[in-house]
Amino acid sequence: MKVLVGVLVGAFALRVLVRLVGAVDWPAVGAAFRLLPWWAPVPLLAALLARQVLNAVPLAVSVPGLPLRRSMQNDLAANLVATMTPPPADVVLRVAMFRSWGIDAVRGMTGVTVNTLTFYSVRFLSPVLGALLLTGQGLERRQWVTTGLCGTIAAVVLGGTLLLLRSDALAATVGRSAGRLVRPVRRSTDPQAWAARVVAFRADSAGGLRRALPRSVLALVGMVLADALVLLAALRMVGVPSADLSTLDVVGGFLLAYPLTLLPLFGLGVLDAVLIGAWTVVAGHDLEPAMVAGTVVWRVVTIMGPWALGALVLAAWRRSSGSAAEVVAAEAAAGEAAADPAPTAPTTL
């Protein structure tokens, strides 16, 4: 469903792009693709791996006993499942992975929650960093206003995360909500018990989590910059020279527009259209086909790449933890049966 929504949003964004910069010269886009050197996958995949490693740091530093490689495996597999299946399949997978590694599920999911909140704060902090990079480029008043609003949201989310680590009431709410997510596929789950365990975990580990928060923020800022590096490399490889579109223009514009990744499939289509429209103003329409080609390469690497890695790590986990994987499948089937006890009755909306 998310893939379908992303495709529909992308189609809409293409119409927006046409309105912003005119009809796309697709033969010229194809010519730009042919400029890609044979060795292009090496630096692009290296930057992607750096992005995924940095993305896994917050969970590793938030969950005691979880090494970075398993944090990366958990994130990649959950991302794949969340994209391809309805919730809470990704939560169930995360829980099963944690248990197969001897990690307390409540501690693991608390780390996931803190990681998610931290990422949202960095998502809205990114325009502030972009505005700082482009301070001398003559940003418009509306861009400063948007940046100020995003900075305020980032501060609120970070403040809320710190409050969560200090408040038993908020910790209980997180545990109860996570328990309710898991309960449809794990009938034995008691949301109140999860709430109590998260409160106990907060009391035991809040100091460590607060110390981990600055490292998590720095790692996720690095992750965003690695994402921008993939985009920058893709643009240069398809013929967008730095003389016409500087590194500051690419990275700064990307950071300014980064909150659009809230949309389905990481802002597929909409973010691309906004970036190409802004870059065309700077570099001119002649480079627009190359810009389109570069953003397509970036999307293939940063969307398809994690899916492929997620499939690989999920298969590896299933081989090494077969019993846990079978439990996930059985619980998912039980959850579907419980959700639809009378298949002969028509469903009404």
Image: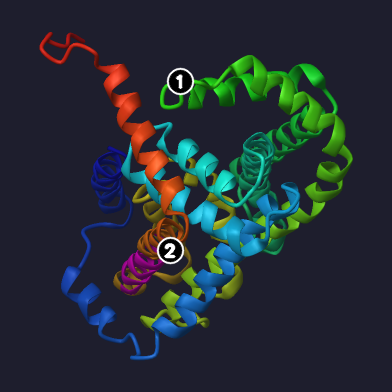
- What element does badge 1 sit on? loop
Please tell me whether residue 292 is drawn above or below residue 161 in the rendered image.
below
Residue projecting furthest to the bottom = 38
In the figure, is residue 166 to the left or right of 289? right
Which region shows up in magenta?
Answer: 290-303
Q: Quadrant of residue 174?
A: top right
Q: Is 39 in the magenta?
A: no
Q: Is residue 145 visible?
A: no
Residue ID for mark 2: 316
Q: Mark 1 or mark 2: which comes first in sequence?
A: 1
Residue 336 image position (x, y, % from top left): 29, 25
Residue ID for mark 1: 187
Residue projecting furthest to the right = 207
Residue 310 image position (x, y, % from top left): 42, 59
Mark number, residue 345: none
Residue 229 image position (x, y, % from top left): 55, 71
Q: CA distance from mark 1 to mark 2?
A: 27 Å
Q: Is residue 248 visible?
A: yes
What is the image's colouring? rainbow
The residue nearer to you, when weighing 265 against 91, is 91
